[in-house]
Image (cartoon, rainbow, N blue to C red):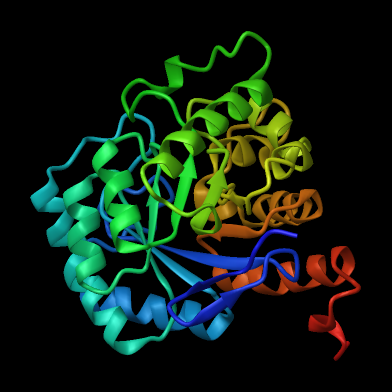
């Protein structure tokens, strides 16, 4: 049993049920077409809708990490994230995750009310590790290679993408824990779509129990990803646009839950919340969470 974690006063008991992370893209160029930019009213409205629909965590990001996205400065990222973070923090009691790999943005966000660090580079920067240790903030360590401009050319794992993930996590966990981050504060994310082909994404999703054996909670982010768009469209057809990938996302999320996912990160919170409850009721039938059915 993985030790429970309390974030912003909320207790996360891994294995009891699946927790839902809602995505707030505070960018103008999100791959999924749902970028909110710096519209405070729109961001707060979306956050409130997500909370009412059953989101357990809100994940705020101010820089697109889609392939070939244009990098932004620390200043610009802070200008996108901090005002929205402050407004949502004041309005809602939900844990707030900050999707950034920049230490100064992370530091400012924690001071403004953020609770959780979601780093697509897996805390590659030593300062991020120190910040996590000193603040006591939980961290999401994601596997990736390269950056937005190079990651799609870095998908060669010599036929062993699962082995690469295991080796990466073992090394990074050693580094992060050596910096003083407590093991119960760590969540792992295999980085679906980040320096992975569609075939590799599917292989990872089929083998989540293997990653779960590392002994840490797993976050899975498949929502609206390109490989789902191609699968939903079918052979010989053009990929479905992001807004039409919800059914494929539901299928992938449901099977990820069966494979051991603890948190799922999604754009379509209202659509996914019910599907997650059904999947949990089947997969985690012994949990008292579902005694009301």
Q: Toward which corner of the image does residue 273 lie, by quadrant? A: bottom right
Check the image and report above or below for 252 versus 96: above
Query: Can you name the residue that lies furthest to the top here?
Result: 158
Q: How many marks?
A: 0
Where does the image place residue 142, in percent across and percent down from the top left?
A: 48, 41
Q: Toward which corner of the image does residue 124 lie, by quadrant? A: top left
* Residue under the image location 91 percent in, 74 percent down: 286
Where does the image place residue 122, in percent across and percent down from the top left?
A: 42, 39
Asked whether residue 39 is in view, the answer is no
* Residue under the image location 61 percent in, 60 percent down: 263
Where does the image place residue 178, in percent across and percent down from the top left?
A: 41, 40
Check the image and report above or below for 90 versus 159: below
- For the residue pair 43 and 221, the one nearer the viewer reads as 221
- For the residue pair 141 and 274, the one nearer the viewer reads as 141
Name the image quarter holding the C terminus.
bottom right
Check the image and report above or below for 154 versus 102: above
- For the residue pair 271 and 174, the one nearer the viewer reads as 174
Asked whether residue 146 is in view, the answer is yes
Q: From the viewer's perspective, is 171 left or right of 211? A: left
Q: From the viewer's perspective, is 151 left or right of 224? A: left
Name the image quarter holding the N terminus.
bottom right
* Residue under the image location 16 percent in, 51 percent down: 104
Where does the image place residue 184, in percent across and percent down from the top left?
A: 55, 58
Q: Toward which corner of the image does residue 232 lie, by quadrant? A: top right
* Residue under the image location 86 percent in, 63 percent down: 283
Check the image and report above or below for 166 versus 48: above
């Amino acid at each position: 049993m993985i030790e429970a974690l309390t974030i912003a006063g909320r207790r996360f008991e891994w294995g009891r049920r699946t927790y839902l992370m809602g995505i707030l893209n505070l960018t103008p160029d999100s791959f999924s077409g749902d970028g909110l930019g710096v519209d405070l009213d729109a961001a707060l409205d979306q956050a409130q809708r997500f909370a009412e629909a059953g989101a357990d965590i809100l994940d705020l990001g101010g820089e697109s990490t889609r392939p070939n996205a244009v990098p932004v400065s620390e200043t610009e990222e802070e200008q996108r994230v901090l005002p929205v973070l402050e407004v949502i923090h004041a309005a809602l009691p939900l844990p707030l995750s900050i999707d950034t790999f920049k230490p100064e943005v992370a530091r400012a966000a924690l001071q403004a009310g953020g609770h959780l660090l979601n780093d697509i580079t897996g805390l590659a920067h030593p300062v991020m590790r120190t910040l996590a240790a000193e603040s006591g903030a939980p961290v999401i360590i994601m596997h990736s290679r390269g950056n937005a401009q190079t990651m799609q050319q870095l998908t060669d794992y010599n036929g062993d993408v699962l082995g690469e993930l295991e080796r990466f996590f073992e090394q990074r966990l050693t580094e992060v824990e050596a910096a003083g981050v407590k093991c119960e504060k760590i969540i792992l994310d295999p980085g679906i779509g980040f320096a992975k082909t569609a075939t590799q994404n599917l292989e990872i999703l089929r083998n989540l129990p293997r990653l779960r054996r590392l002994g840490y909670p797993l976050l899975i982010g498949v929502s609206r990803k390109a490989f789902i768009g191609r699968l939903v469209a079918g052979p010989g057809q053009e990929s479905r646009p992001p807004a039409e990938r919800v059914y494929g996302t539901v299928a992938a999320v449901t099977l990820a839950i069966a494979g051991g996912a603890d948190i799922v990160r999604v754009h379509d919170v209202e659509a996914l919340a019910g599907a997650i409850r059904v999947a949990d009721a089947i997969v985690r039938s012994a949990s008292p969470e579902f005694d009301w059915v």
